[in-house]
Amino acid sequence: MIKIYPLEWFDSLIINSFDADNSSLKVSEYELENLRKTIVSESKIIKIQIKDSFFELKSKRQIRLLIRKYHSSLVFLLDRIVEIRMIEKFNSPDFFRIFDLIVSSLDDLLSFVEIRYSSFMSLDQRVSYSYFSIWKKETLEVLKNVIKKRKYCGQ
């Protein structure tokens, strides 16, 4: 079984760096670029670790457990970054750029896990807030169109 936590860097970044008590609120362009590079690099490393750990396991049960752990951890981190984004002191364009980078990278990792290992996923897995928001928006749009069509047809 895996002895390391591959999402440790993202977890630390999200939980520790954006702590509500954290007082360093300035981000330079240089720091932003370094963070972007590190996020991209860490994302690639995590994908490799997921693939490696997948092939190390022998039973489907172990694989299913591993994939579900990755999935739930990624969903938790995505939800946490959405919560942090709503904190007023992080309400600046620089932080929004950072949050967008993190969210897109985590979304990419989540998609990687869901697509590549879908046969090991459960249909009752929790979805992230960002997925739910998109689904809700699309569903409301479809409902509006159905209502318009119904009114147009005179029913």
Image (cartoon, rainbow, N blue to C red):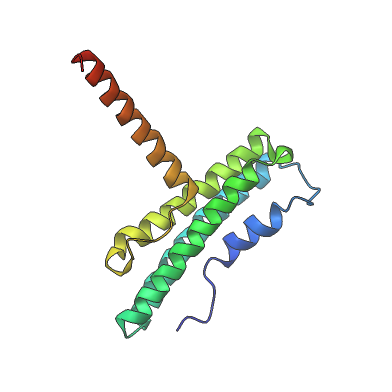
Instruction: Say which residue appears at 42% left-offset and 57% top-offset.
Output: 110
The residue furthest front is 155
The N terminus lies in which quarter of the figure? bottom left
Give residue 30's position: percent from left, percent from top: 67, 44
- Side of 4 relative to 16 (left or right): left
Instruction: Say which residue appears at 54% left-offset and 51% top-offset.
Output: 79
Instruction: Say which residue appears at 39% left-offset and 61% top-offset.
Output: 125
- Side of 33 relative to 65 (left or right): right
- Side of 27 relative to 1 (left or right): right
The residue furthest left is 153
Instruction: Say which residue appears at 71% left-offset and 42% top-offset.
Output: 27
Give residue 153's position: percent from left, percent from top: 18, 15
Give residue 113's position: percent from left, percent from top: 37, 62
Q: Quadrant of residue 11?
A: bottom right
Q: Quadrant of residue 4?
A: bottom right
Give residue 129's position: percent from left, percent from top: 49, 47
Q: Nearer the viewer, residue 122 or 92?
A: 122
> Is 113 placed above or below 153 here?
below
